[in-house]
């Protein structure tokens, strides 16, 4: 079956992140390119961080959804440069995170300076209060930190900046 890049991008919107199932790989911005050479489809992806355990499952899911739609052969290529950044997260993805109860990354903030700067203000995804504090740098997955809201007292994950 001959495909167009627009068709493939649309189909890839069905592939969700195994760790945060409300986000698609398009929301995350990890799909860098789609190339079509004859009948072969190549999907180029960048992991949210090197060694992300979800990438193998994402590759399997990309191949599965495209094969279900009748496309083959399919090649998934992982590139590490340029490194993924939370700036690639779509606005729709940020909204989905908040509705799911995960605070999206604070724009313009990078965790590398966390040891040397003031604690970042992360709004609570439940009540939108800025009166929050980090409980642990490490949350339910390596890409998240655990926070609590001092207003509504709910704990929540914060999607770390990269």
Image (tube, rainbow, N blue to C red):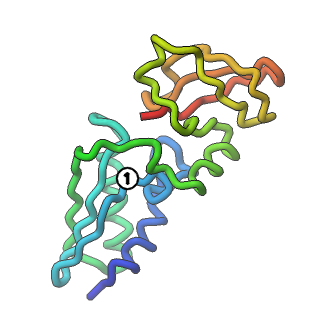
Q: Is residue 1 visible?
A: no
Q: Residue at x 40, y 42 (%)?
A: 85
> 97 or 132: nearer the eye?
132
Task: Give the residue drawn at x 51%, y 14%.
Answer: 117
Numbered marks: total: 1
Give the side of residue 47 with respect to residue 143, left or right: left
| Quadrant of residue 48 within the rendered picture | top left
When the figure is inspected, residue 156 is found, relative to residue 125, above or below; the finding is: above
Q: Do we see residue 144 in this rendering?
A: yes
**Residue 150 versus residue 95 in the image, above or below:** above
**Vertical comparison of 7 with 156: above or below:** below
Q: Secondary structure at mark 1?
A: loop
Q: Position of residue 54 (x, y in %)?
A: 37, 42
Q: Give the residue furthest to the bottom.
A: 2
The residue shown at (49%, 50%) is: 89
From the viewer's perspective, is 110 left or right of 80? right
Indicate the quadrant containing the C terminus: top left, top right, bottom left or bottom right.
top left
Quadrant where the N terminus sits is: bottom left
> Mark 1 — residue?
30
Query: Where residue 161 appears, x then y in whole percent?
Result: 47, 33
In this rendering, the answer to whether 7 lies above or below 157 is: below
| Residue at screen point 70% across, 31% down | 123
The location of residue 51, given as percent across then percent down, is 28, 34
Q: Position of residue 107 (x, y in %)?
A: 55, 39
Residue placed most toward the observer, 135 or 132: 132
Disc 1 crowd, CA 10 A, few/some/many (<14, 14-19, 20+): many
Q: What is the residue that sits farthest to the top in this orientation?
A: 116
């Amino acid at each position: 079956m001959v495909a167009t890049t627009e068709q493939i991008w649309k189909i890839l919107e069905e592939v969700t992140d195994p760790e945060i199932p409300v986000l698609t790989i398009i929301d995350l911005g990890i799909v860098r390119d789609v190339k079509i050479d004859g009948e072969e489809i190549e999907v180029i992806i960048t992991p949210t961080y090197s060694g992300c355990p979800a990438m193998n499952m994402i590759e399997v899911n990309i191949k599965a959804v495209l094969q279900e739609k009748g496309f083959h052969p399919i090649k998934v290529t992982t590139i590490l440069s340029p490194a993924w950044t939370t700036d690639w997260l779509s606005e729709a993805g940020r909204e989905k995170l908040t509705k799911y109860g995960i605070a999206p990354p604070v724009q313009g903030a990078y965790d590398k300076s966390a040891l040397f700067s003031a604690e970042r203000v992360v709004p609570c995804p439940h009540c939108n209060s800025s009166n929050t504090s980090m409980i642990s740098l490490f949350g339910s997955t390596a890409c998240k930190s655990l926070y609590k809201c001092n207003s509504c007292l709910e704990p929540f994950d914060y999607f770390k900046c990269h």
